[in-house]
Image: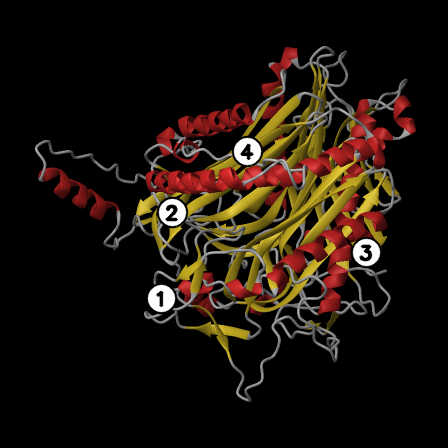
């Protein structure tokens, strides 16, 4: 057996009263892993039982340890009736399967026989019940011992690190990018099985939670096998999605970028903040492809046929397999990371996307694989049409309504550099960083018209008038002015129909919806006085009678692109164009020729000037959909402290059916609520804003918002165009007038923490402001279900959701603490499905969260 898991139950506390006669509980614990179950002794009449049990041992294959969660159920013993369930704890064992301390800590000297077995899990974990929430805590200790195993047919992928971060993890350096990895697993949903009619709500919810935890482990294991085949040792930009298809079942998808990472030493880590990556030519002049099949990283890369072994106190790593052939990035040149080292991206062409409408009804994973294959091939063809060899910041999204599913894939077409990288000094002062936004194609190579101009900085390459990208802002790029949150929303009504007729109507409406969405983005971009959108996210939401498209991004003004035109100037230009169009229309004869002539759109001259920026941030706030703040350097500010992660969920009935203006106003209300609640923390930056629209039931609309408030402070050396410089210019201009105007600038009250903070910091960013990530402890993913039949008595639907989210975050923090961490970075809430029935006083909420557990030091800055 390759692994022996040992579990010890210490004690419990704050358990609920289960025996009303004595106001106590007769508690015992069931420990289950796979098909093996153990039980502790019953602790009589105590709400804080002390078990101090023996070590319960499970001997299993390491592949089973990856798939199966450790289930700890707290029960109340009854003599004359069935035992009552108090709650459960699901424990992810993947952090224990890290092969060595190199995958956990940045210090290679820690690679000894004592810590090669992984880390232990020790702490108090909340006991969760799907009907009542958190019901006490239980203290457990879990340890794992790995055995030697040289079976070349083993199906485990122990040792592969998963990072939810879209950036290169802090303390690591990128050595090789191998390409895109993905996996899809299909299973039946216990909620819709026939036996559900005789099940209780608690048993149904627990069956779904157990299934989701198992599918999560299975997807990671299968992706890890693909990563081992590529010769990589980590997955960066990992995303996992649960597609709830109702009676058809559940589809779990995982995707990421397979890379080879090296651990930075302490001296290299200090230099890493001052240096960047640049391409290096080999001495013989040959260029080795960056995306290759083999690697020799310092982090252990275990071939599938071997595992770790310990010999005389030393770590023994079997030799890696080498492949004769090299290829670029496999069949799909997609990279899920949004930020790359300088020099890796040569050119950015623009955003590419593809969508497909499918009719559900076939319960096979192969069918869904073929659907995504078609979509990815279309995205790849779009990138090649723009003379690009890769798609960066690649994402996939689905929306399901009954038997119709819309698949969406999007990214940014780019030209990447096929060379090895090493740490070298920064770019020369002569290089202004504008080359990355030079288009890699020309006007002659495309059949449609396009307008390209010379770069406004170097006057050499050609650039477009506007740029839309899903990636972060590239390093070294000059940005003018202040970034602005920009969003567009289109709501189209449709007939309520079923089957193929419904799929056809959705498919016919999609092109027009995307056209309107793009038109709104262009209008709002002009109204904001910007020429580029970074961090652009476009999502669709399908209901029985409505189809909604939503796009959010950060509008910035790039110095390399042509300066944006003023709306007034554009109005004059449009009026002259309309006169020319009127003359052309007089010459058209509609009495002859093709009678199937239709008018697509009439753009009035006032439509652009009247396009207001929805949710404009008040003074003291910097708002961005990206993790980096584009205008922070321009204002002389730097993030120094994490202030508050916020989650806003709004839900209402759509009677009558909403319009685009109605839904947009709700986005504005959400943002205004965030601004009001965080008004005491200014100046601050609201970064990594993530909006999501969902229609969980007919005539219901749900909008969720997740983001992070980061405290800003003035730099020691402000640049010339900083806040003080702008204030000085304002005073000089006003002094020349008759009425001087002076507005005091509020100085920052935020200071970086100088000592270790208490508790666990949860942030959707890949870094912790004011701290240094010392070690990565593993990727965690949780799926919780909460149901209640007394919504009105507990404060209504708002209190129900608020309490559920707070309990989920408390459980996440407890699990991070149990594995030795004090922060969770790259936090994501990928699924939030809320269903309620006001007449029956019932509600159910499904929540999927995840991130990277880390240990942060606040003293080594």
**Lower sequence index among marks 1 and 4:** 1
Between 854 and 38, the one lying in front of the other is 854
Mark 1 or 4, which is nearer the eye? 1
Q: Which mark is residue 63?
A: 3
Q: Which mark is residue 640?
A: 2
Between 486 and 694, the one lying in front of the other is 486
The image quadrant where one finds the N terminus is: bottom right
Mark 3 or 1, which is nearer the eye? 1
**Lower sequence index among marks 3 and 1:** 3
Mark 1 or 2, which is nearer the eye? 1
**Lower sequence index among marks 1 and 2:** 1
Mark 4 or 2, which is nearer the eye? 4
Task: Assign a secondary structure to mark 2.
Answer: strand
**How busy is the neighbourhood of tag 1: few (under 14 within 10 Å), some, or many (20 plus)?**
few
Residue assigned mark 1: 459
Residue at point 75%, 19% (across, down): 18
Between 403 and 223, the one lying in front of the other is 403
**Lower sequence index among marks 4 and 3:** 3
**Is residue 54 visible in the rendered structure shown here?**
no
Q: Which mark is residue 489?
A: 4
Task: Assign a secondary structure to mark 4.
Answer: strand
Expressed as whole percent of the image width and height from the top left, the position of residue 807 reads 62, 30
Task: Assign a secondary structure to mark 3.
Answer: helix
């Amino acid at each position: 057996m390759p692994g022996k898991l040992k579990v010890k139950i210490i004690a419990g506390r704050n358990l609920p009263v289960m025996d009303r006669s004595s106001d106590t509980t007769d508690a015992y614990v069931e420990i289950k892993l796979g098909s093996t179950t153990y039980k502790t002794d019953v602790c009589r009449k105590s709400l804080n039982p002390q078990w101090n049990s023996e070590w319960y041992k499970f001997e299993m294959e390491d592949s089973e340890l990856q798939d199966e969660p450790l289930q700890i159920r707290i029960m109340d013993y009854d003599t004359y009736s069935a035992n009552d369930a108090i709650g459960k704890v699901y424990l992810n064992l993947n952090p224990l399967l890290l092969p060595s301390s190199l995958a956990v800590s940045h210090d290679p000297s820690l690679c000894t026989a004592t810590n090669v077995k992984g880390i232990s899990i020790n702490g108090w974990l909340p006991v969760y019940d799907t009907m009542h929430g958190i019901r006490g805590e239980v203290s457990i200790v879990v340890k794992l011992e790995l055995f030697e195993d040289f079976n070349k047919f083993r199906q485990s992928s122990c040792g592969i690190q998963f990072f939810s971060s879209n950036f290169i993890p802090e303390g690591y350096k990128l050595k090789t990018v191998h390409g895109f990895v993905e996996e899809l697993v299909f299973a039946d949903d216990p909620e819709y099985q026939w036996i559900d009619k005789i099940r209780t709500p608690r048993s149904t919810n627990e069956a779904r939670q157990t299934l989701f935890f198992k599918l999560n482990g299975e997807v990671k294991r299968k992706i890890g096998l693909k990563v081992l085949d590529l010769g990589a040792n980590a997955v960066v930009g990992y995303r996992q999605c649960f597609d709830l298809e109702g009676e058809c079942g559940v589809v779990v998808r995982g995707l990421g970028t397979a890379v080879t990472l090296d651990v930075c030493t302490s001296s290299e880590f200090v230099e890493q903040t001052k240096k960047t990556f640049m391409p290096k030519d080999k001495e013989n002049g040959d260029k080795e492809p960056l995306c290759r099949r083999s690697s020799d990283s310092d982090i252990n890369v275990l071939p599938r046929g071997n595992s770790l072994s310990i010999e005389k106190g030393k770590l023994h790593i079997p030799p890696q397999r080498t492949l004769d052939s090299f290829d670029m990035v496999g069949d799909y040149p997609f990279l899920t990371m949004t930020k790359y080292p300088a020099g890796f991206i040569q050119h950015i062409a623009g955003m590419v996307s593809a969508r497909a409408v499918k009719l559900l009804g076939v319960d096979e994973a192969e069918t869904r694989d073929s659907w995504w294959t078609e979509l990815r091939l279309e995205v790849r063809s779009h990138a090649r049409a723009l003379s690009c060899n890769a798609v960066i910041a690649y994402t996939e999204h689905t929306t399901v309504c009954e038997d119709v599913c819309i698949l969406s894939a999007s990214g940014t077409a780019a030209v990447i550099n096929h060379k090895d990288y090493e740490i070298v000094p920064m770019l020369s002062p002569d290089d202004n960083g504008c080359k990355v936004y030079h288009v890699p194609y020309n006007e002659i190579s495309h059949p449609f018209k396009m307008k390209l101009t010379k770069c406004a900085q170097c006057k050499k390459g050609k650039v477009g008038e506007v740029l839309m990208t899903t990636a972060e802002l590239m390093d070294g790029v000059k940005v003018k002015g202040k970034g602005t949150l920009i969003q567009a929303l289109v709501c189209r009504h449709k007939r309520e129909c079923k089957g193929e007729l419904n799929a056809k109507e959705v498919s016919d409406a999609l092109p027009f919806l995307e056209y309107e969405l793009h038109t709104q983005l262009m209008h709002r971009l002009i109204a904001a006085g910007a020429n580029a959108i970074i961090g652009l996210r476009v999502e669709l939401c399908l209901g029985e009678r409505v189809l909604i498209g939503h796009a959010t991004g950060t509008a910035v003004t790039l110095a390399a692109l042509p300066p944006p035109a003023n709306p007034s100037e554009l109005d004059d230009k449009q009026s002259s164009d309309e006169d020319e169009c009127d003359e052309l229309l007089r010459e058209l004869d509609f009495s002859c020729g093709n009678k199937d002539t239709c008018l697509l759109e009439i753009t009035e001259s006032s439509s652009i000037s009247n396009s207001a920026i929805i949710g404009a941030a008040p003074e003291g706030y910097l708002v961005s959909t990206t993790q980096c703040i584009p205008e922070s350097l321009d204002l002389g500010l730097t993030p120094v402290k994490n202030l508050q992660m916020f989650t806003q969920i709004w839900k209402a009935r759509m009677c009558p059916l909403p319009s685009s203006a109605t839904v947009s106003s709700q986005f504005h209300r959400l943002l205004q609520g965030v601004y009001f609640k965080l008004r005491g923390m200014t100046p601050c930056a609201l970064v990594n804003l993530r909006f999501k629209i969902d229609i969980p039931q007919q005539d219901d609309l749900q909008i969720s918002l997740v983001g992070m408030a980061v405290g800003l402070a003035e730099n020691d050396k402000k640049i010339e165009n900083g806040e003080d410089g702008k204030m000085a210019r304002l005073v000089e201009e006003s002094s020349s007038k008759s009425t001087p105007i002076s507005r005091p600038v509020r100085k920052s009250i935020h200071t970086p923490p100088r000592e270790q903070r208490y508790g666990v910091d949860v942030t959707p960013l890949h870094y912790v402001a004011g701290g240094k990530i010392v070690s990565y402890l593993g990727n965690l993913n949780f799926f919780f279900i909460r149901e209640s039949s007394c919504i009105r008595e507990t404060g209504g639907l708002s209190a129900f959701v608020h309490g559920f989210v707070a309990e989920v975050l408390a459980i996440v923090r407890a699990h991070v603490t149990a594995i030795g961490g004090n922060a969770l970075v790259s936090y994501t809430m990928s699924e939030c499905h809320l269903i309620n029935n006001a007449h029956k006083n019932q509600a159910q909420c499904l929540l999927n969260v995840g991130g990277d557990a880390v240990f942060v030091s606040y003293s080594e800055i």
